[in-house]
Amino acid sequence: MIDITLQNFEAELINASMQTPVLLDIWAPWCGPCKSLGPVLEKLEADYAGRFTLAKLDSDDQPDIAGQLSQAFGVRSIPFCVMFVGGQPIDGFVGALPESQIRSFLDKHVPSADALAAVEEAQEAELLAAEGDSDAALAKLSEALAIAPGDDAIRADYVKRLLEAGRTADARRVYEPLGPKAIVDARASALALWLEACEVAAKARAPEALAAAIGADKRDFAARFELAQTHMAAQRHTEAMDELLEILMRDKAWSDERARKLYVAILELLSKPQPKAAPTEAKGTLEIAGKAAAVASDPVVDGYRRKLSMVLF
């Protein structure tokens, strides 16, 4: 349990909720229902074993924060509890509710024990991959996905690691549940094109043959695209984008914009995933709320984004 003040509001509530949901209990020493609710919330924090953090705010000591939250949610009484996820207040309840109702509220916003365990396995996989132990990382991701088969982020990471390891057939099998989401999910769409490139590369013409075809006809876009796919399959991403730029400079709309789509997919794969957004729309915005930390940019990715913009626009 954490006591929230104006000084630690951003660190302990806004930033902390980017990692773990935080339930803020707004109370006052003179409030009878607050005194009965407090022990219930503390018991639930212990029962949920790290799946959410309980924070408390004395409305008498911190009227600015309490006032802004009350105004944002249209609430005028306490106890008033607000759930923070992804750096934003997303839901709340008023009054000393029974424990069963509070559990129902928490279960809407707090990850299950299995989901939390899967995330921990995935985080261990990332560390192992950074240390160069790709086999152990893949084993961890397999375990994580077995625990939480509906976690698309873990599934996408597993597919990516399998492709990096050259296990195209396994990657195709793991990817299948993501297929229907490729229309609206940029990561899933990019992985689909990488999978296709790996499958094409397995039966593509030799690099010398492709180079000869391109040398004989600079507008042999099919050969140039095939070469770009073989580069992508081999994780020679800048070489792949260079070939795709050659197509785009000559014919932006070639073959239903396949060159542009593959180029964008490579940029997506080279970019770090954005922080997970809050699961529901925020009901209000705090003036004193901090912003989510931006993902650090990559100069190579930024440079190739600029090249694409120059060609397209």
Image (cartoon, rainbow, N blue to C red):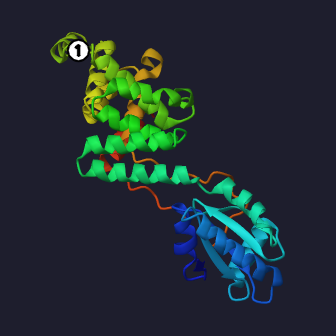
Q: Which element is circle 1 on?
A: helix
> Residue drawn at (54%, 74%), measured in percent from left and top?
12
Q: Nearer the viewer, residue 208 or 51?
A: 51
296 or 149: nearer the eye? 149
Q: Quadrant of residue 135?
A: top left
Q: Position of residue 256 (x, y in %)?
A: 48, 18
Badge 1 is on which residue? 214
Q: Position of residue 142 (x, y in %)?
A: 40, 39
Badge 1 density bin: few <14, some 14–19, many ≥20, Cα 10 Å = some
Residue in the foreground of this view, choosing between 102 and 166: 102
The vertical placement of 247 against 114, above or below, is above
Please tell me which residue is depicted at 33% across the width and 25% down the height of the picture. Answer: 168
What's the residue at 24%, 46% (across, down)?
A: 133
Left or right of residue 165, residue 31 in this image: right
The amino acid type of the residue labelled 1 equals Ile
Indicate left or right for 71 with 230 as reference. Answer: right
Q: Is any atom of residue 33 visible in this view?
A: yes
Quadrant in the picture for residue 237: top left
Q: Is 32 above or below relative to 130?
A: below
Image position, residue 252 (x, y; %): 42, 23
